[in-house]
Image (tube, rainbow, N blue to C red):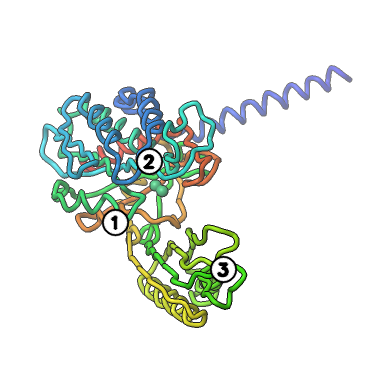
Amino acid sequence: MIKLYLLILLVLWSGMLQAQTKQRNASPKKVSNPSWVKNIPADDVVKWRHHIHQNPELSFEEENTGKYVEEVLKSFPNIEVVRPAKTSVVGILRGAKPGKTVAFRADMDALPMQEETGLPYSSKVENVMHSCGHDAHAAMLLGTAATLSKMQSQLKGTVYFIFQHAEETPPGGAVDIIKSGVLKDVDAFFGMHVLPDFPAGHVGILPDGAASTAQDVFHLTIIGKGSHGSMPHLGIDPIVAGAAIVSALQSVVSRNVTPGEMTVVTIGKFQSGDAFNVIADRAELAASIRTTSEPTRKQVEARIKEIIDNIIEAYGADYKLDYIPTYPAIQNDANLNAHARKSVVAILGKDQVFDAPMMTASEDFSYYREIAPVSFMTLGIGEGAANHNPKFAVDDSALPNGVKAQVQIILDYLNK
Ligand SMILES: [Zn+2]
Ligand SMILES: [Zn+2]
């Protein structure tokens, strides 16, 4: 009886094994493995990223980063280096055969914050940190340039590798590079941003049309009247007026904008006062406003101005307001997006490509659309803190896939 039981078990087990093998054979991974993949300098990409990460520089101050990127680019064959702005670097690779011109863009600036990752290659600069992953962007694009530079003799057309300064601070570095005229012949622009909470190395194709938000900024100075802390009736308290403004502005999104339309009003700065027993005479506020459509952008601006004006009047204070429109929303071109998706699926496989939701952030990559159509995508870097958080960290294992995707997108575009 026991023997029979064991026999039945054995038959069942071998049947299961066969079924599993069949299942594996039925869905082989359709991923191409071109010969250039072995030329990707994966270790160097990590080394370059760690160097840039340890030596972060703020927007418009990327002098050493620019120099470093220029030196690395010049170590590759066939790359011509130009400096379209003080701290930006563009590498140009002209293929042996004529063809189209395609550009891939990386940014290189860091943010004014203290790193708290505890990583061995943490920032060496106090209060400056690569917390948006621009170190990864620059390193990956160097990897892409290195890989493609060895294929010059087969290459049809021209590739521009844009290492852009000052993405984080409006008016942004993109406008300087565009103004320089260096990119005037580019037929298509691609860009890639690292994003946590998606599997490391998975590429997200952002929506056609609005792929990010437009950003407007305001700086508000509330002018009150200083007084002794025990004699509030003799002063005009700018902190109380400012607090009322901050509270009232929360109603713009919740009570004025159509529900469901992505809009953000964030007061990121509120500074006033020096002592506990003094009524300050001034308060400084600054805000970031994100919208996805032009009518809402105008509606929100009008509401914010009304609220500030009326509250200031009610509190008997005065004010100075600078309302500054900055980056428009990225408008992804549907054809370029389809092209990017096809290339990335071909090189990484379908299971490593996903539909990314629209980004709530804003990006000056949007400006390149003044020259040619654009496609912006994301690269997953695994679970972790959000961009602009002091604990933000990039999983290095994501970087080779980023390079593979970039190289394939460029090659396919030029061979189209
Ligand atoms: Zn950022
Ligand atoms: Zn960024």
Q: What amino acid type is highlighted by mark number 3?
A: His
Say if disc 2 is inside 8 Å of ligand 2. yes
Q: Quadrant of the N terminus?
A: top right
Q: Is residue 60 above or below residue 276?
A: above
| Residue 78 pos. (x, y %) | 16, 28
Q: Is residue 228 above or below residue 85?
A: below
Q: Which residue is mark 1?
A: 171
Say if disc 3 is inside 8 Å of ligand 1. no
Q: What amino acid type is highlighted by mark number 1?
A: Pro
**For the point 62% across and 26% down, which residue is it?**
18
Q: Which residue is mark 2?
A: 134
Q: Report, in whole angstroms, how far the alpha carbon at label 3 lies from the one at label 1.
A: 41 Å
Q: What amino acid type is highlighted by mark number 2?
A: His
Q: Are marks 2 and 3 in contact (CB under 8 Å)?
A: no
In the picture provided, is 173 more to the left or to the right than 405?
left
Quarter assignment of residue 124: top left
Q: Report, in whole angstroms, how far the alpha carbon at label 2 lies from the one at label 1.
A: 18 Å
Q: Is residue 233 above or below residue 63?
A: below
**For the point 17% across and 34% down, which residue is it?**
81
Q: Which residue is mark 3?
A: 228
Q: Are marks 3 and 1 in contact (CB under 8 Å)?
A: no
Of discs 2 and 3, which sits in the foreground?
3
**Label 2 crowding class (10 Å Cα cut-off): few <14, some 14-19, many 20+?**
many
Quarter assignment of residue 348: top left
Residue 246 makes an appearance in the image:
no
In the picture provided, is 268 more to the left or to the right than 405?
right
In the displayed image of the protein, which residue is found farthest to the top? 3
